[in-house]
Amino acid sequence: MTPDSPSDAREPDPAALQAARDAVDALPRRKEQLLPALLAAQHAIGWLPRAAVEHVHRHTRVPVSEVYATATAYSELRLEPPVPGQWHVCTGVACDLAGAPALLAAAPDRTARVDCQFLCALAPVVVDEHERLHGRMTPDDLRARMEAPAASKPARRSRAKR
């Protein structure tokens, strides 16, 4: 990459990567903390780049192959940077039967398939660009939510101190 070329989307922001390291380092150094560490890293960066996975591996003392196995086993975790504006349609069995193909067809440029979100009672389920879940969606509901001004702003989340 030359100094004049745009930054690689696969490289995380250094400040976000440091925030991820700090969040992981705040957890106990035990293998039982693997999933919380992955979630903390992803929350800080928005996805799990190689540097974050390797930090989780060193911190939890879990083999890097197991860290990757865990990261790929959970649909909530992603090893690729999110595509801005893209919504994900659950394609698990219940969602597929409840209308996921129609949702994908309703907005093919802004939707992508995602593995089961384990919210079968709310099928079909869509995950918006800010990781908010929407259940019992119809194609009209999906288009309306995508066009709504609130779709462009992440919801504020308050976290109680534990």
Image: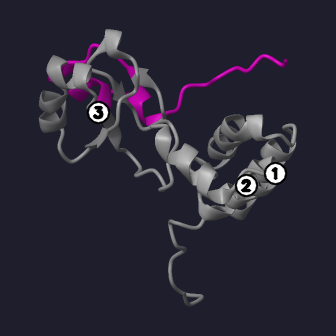
What residue sits 26% from the left and 32% below the top? 91
Residue 49's x, y, as percent? 59, 59
Mark 1 residue type: His
Element assignment for label 1: helix
Label 1: few (<14), some or many (≥20) within 10 Å?
many
Colour basis: one colour
In whole angstroms, how far apart are the C-alphas of marks 1 and 2?
6 Å
Q: Which residue is mark 3?
A: 89
Q: Which residue is mark 2?
A: 57
Residue 63 counted in the magenta span: no
Contact flag, marks 1 and 2 (Cβ < 8 Å): yes
- As drawn, is 51 to the left or to the right of 136? right
Residue 100's x, y, as percent? 19, 27
Q: Which residues are magenta?
A: 134-162
In whole angstroms, how far apart are the C-alphas of marks 3 and 1?
33 Å
Mark 2 residue type: His
Quarter of the image where one finds residue 115: top left
Residue 145 counted in the magenta span: yes
Residue 127's x, y, as percent? 39, 30
Contact flag, marks 3 and 1 (Cβ < 8 Å): no
Q: Which residue is mark 1?
A: 59
Contact flag, marks 3 and 2 (Cβ < 8 Å): no
Residue 18's x, y, as percent? 78, 56
In whole angstroms, how far apart are the C-alphas of marks 3 and 2?
30 Å
What residue sits 84% from the left and 19% below the top? 161
